[in-house]
Amino acid sequence: MRFLGIETSCDETAAAVVVDGTQVVSSVVSSQVDLHARYGGVVPEVASRAHVEMLMPVVAQALVEAGVTGAEIDAVAATVGPGLIGSLLVGVSAAKSLSLVWDVPFVAVNHLEAHLYAAFLEEPTIELPLVVLLVSGGHTMLVSMEGHGQYRLIGQTLDDAAGEAFDKVARFLDLGYPGGPLIDRLSFDGDPRAIAFPRPMLNDGLDFSFSGLKTAVVNHVRKHPDVGAADVAASFQQAVVDVLVTKARRAASKIGARGICLAGGVAANSQLRMRILDVCEEDSLHAFIPSRSMCTDNAAMIAAAGYYCWQRHGASPIDTGADPNLRLSVL
Ligand code: KG4
Ligand code: ZN
């Protein structure tokens, strides 16, 4: 089954062709980062308009790079939520139109579920049960994955998402947008032990809280205006990674997982990737760390999740709507 995947939930316009949920034949991502950078964050109206302009050229490029025509596509999968409603509608409308024109199934995909599937694209034989640490700009979750479509939410953030904390701290330090990659890079020049920022809820279950940490960074910099930005970035990153790694490890031991899998944009973080590899080795767990381009938003993961969804449930009704608040459906 040759799936065309379409992703427009936030600020990346993406299309990909994936065969049988595992073979990525093309994956095109057009980022709107430059459009939003001057505002310090994603402006929803600007994002939807940019998706309208870019989507068909991106789909055309994905087909050309895959060496196929529309007539050779067997199904079209698109993100229906969660995300920005205006942005979602562009991808959903396009996907439904293409499925009608080509007379192939339309498959509605949950963006969070798609992030869980990113690792399967590179490692189709992952052994379950698995703890997935899903850390993105909008979500921070620990998911126990017991089978395809069988998820249990075992931990989540009570306030800010990890990526949101990276973006807010970067904005406060005047580093630019999006903050995660900039803090990641700057941290190589700083000392992670320079400032002892709090590790929120470290010894407390599997939930997270990052808004107090962000406030601690702001307070520290206001009190010590001469502190080096690299030391602040490295110490903040260390605090976030300490909490994420400790809880992922605790979750794996609690559910008797075979491995830990990273997903979502923050999974591109260099420190997080190294530390997860280290603890998995110590605890004799498999570490599944997708390549950076599979961690951040892309359409290959949408096509892959679409394939597994279609295997379980078949085509989605053509009147399925976009849902900005869609949740991960859990056991
Ligand atoms: O998954 P994603 O591309 O979009 C959402 O679904 O949210 O995640 C974007 C988030 C942003 O907050 C961005 O700052 C963060 O992922 N991010 C990183 C890194 N690369 C992206 N955070 C930390 N370190 C990185 N290298
Ligand atoms: Zn995402």
Image: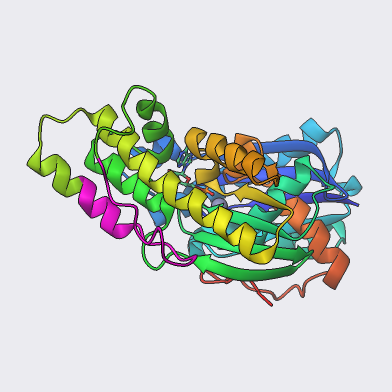
Report whether 281 appears left or right of 64.
left
Q: Quadrant of residue 170?
A: top left
Q: Nearer the viewer, residue 271 or 148?
A: 271
Q: Nearer the viewer, residue 187 or 275?
A: 275
Main SS type for the magenta part? loop
Report whether 138 appears left or right of 196.
right
Q: Which residues are magenta?
A: 196-217
* Picture coordinates of residue 270, whole percent (x, y): 51, 33
Report whether 296 appears left or right of 39.
right
Residue at 70% across, 53% down: 302
Residue 209 in the magenta stretch? The answer is yes
Q: Compared to 142, does 228 lie above or below?
A: above
Residue at 85% across, 32% down: 67
Residue at 78% across, 71% down: 316
The answer to whether one can see residue 151 in this image is yes
Q: Quadrant of residue 267?
A: top right
* Quarter that holds the C terminus: bottom right
Q: Compared to 228, does 131 lie above or below?
A: below
* Picture coordinates of residue 238, whole percent (x, y): 38, 40
The answer to whether one can see residue 98 in this image is no
Q: Compared to 135, does 220 lie above or below?
A: above
Residue at 57% across, 43% down: 296
Residue 210 in the magenta stretch? The answer is yes
Q: Nearer the viewer, residue 328 or 272?
A: 272
Q: Nearer the viewer, residue 269 or 75?
A: 269
